[in-house]
Image (spheres, rainbow, N blue to C red):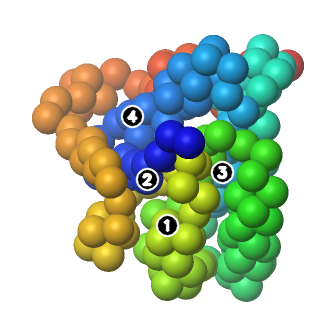
Amino acid sequence: MKRGYTHIYTGNGKGKTTAAFGLALRAACSGKKIFIGQFVKNMKYNETKIVKIMGNIDIKQFGSGCFIDREPSKKDIDFAEKGFDSCLNIIASEKYDMIILDELTIALYFNLINEARVIKLIQDKPIELELIITGRYASDNLIFESDLVTEMRCVKHYYESGVLARDGIERWYRNIA
């Protein structure tokens, strides 16, 4: 039995979800089964089309819409809590080799989910499970419990020169079929 590790991709720079989806694609091409739970998100982004291409990747969203510019509602909290419970059941099923909890740190930062529950998940996860957590504002506790932590830091971005979001690069929610 090979050991699986816990990864965190955090920071204010671009590429956290992209890094996680890159790992998912690599694992899927190696015959592994992947589940991606997206917290906070509820739109069908282009990245979610991967399930049509790769039969061994499943995605479920646990968000009611963007609340970053307002206080989270009871509905936002309910979606996150039920989503986390769903992820715990999926992990317990041991059906997947890799679980990605996209934007989980955002759900923690806005107190949608109790951090102690996430720490317990990391500590008690099946030994062979590869667990990937993404989002800004990863706490020191989460970082301490994880095996691999990468902080995405923006050094330079063309947005600062007036370049707007481009389809398929920064904007991934258009042209959904």
* Amino acid on which disc 1 is placed: Ile
**Badge 1 vs badge 3, beta-carbon distance below 8 Å:** no
Using the numbered discs, state the Cα–Cα distance from disc 4 to disc 3 in whole angstroms. 15 Å
The residue sitting at 63% across, 15% down in the picture is 29
Q: Nearer the viewer, mark 2 or mark 4?
A: 2
Residue 170: percent from the left, percent from the top? Answer: 47, 27
Callout 2 touching callout 1 (CB < 8 Å): yes
Which residue position holds label 2?
A: 6
Q: CA distance from mark 2 to mark 1?
A: 7 Å
Residue at position x 30%, y 64% in the image: 143
Residue at the spot of label 1: 122
Residue 151 falls left or right of residue 34: left
Residue in front for this viewpoint, 108 or 168: 108
* Lower position in the chain sequence, tag 1 or tag 3: 3
In this rendering, which labeled residue sits more in front, label 4 or label 1? 1
Tell me if mark 1 has few (under 14), some (14-19) or many (20+) residues whose alpha carbon lies within 10 angstroms of its own.
some
Residue 15 badge: 4
Looking at the image, tell me whether mark 2 or mark 3 is earlier in sequence order: 2
Q: Which mark is residue 38?
A: 3
User: Is label 2 in a helix, a strand or a loop?
Assistant: strand
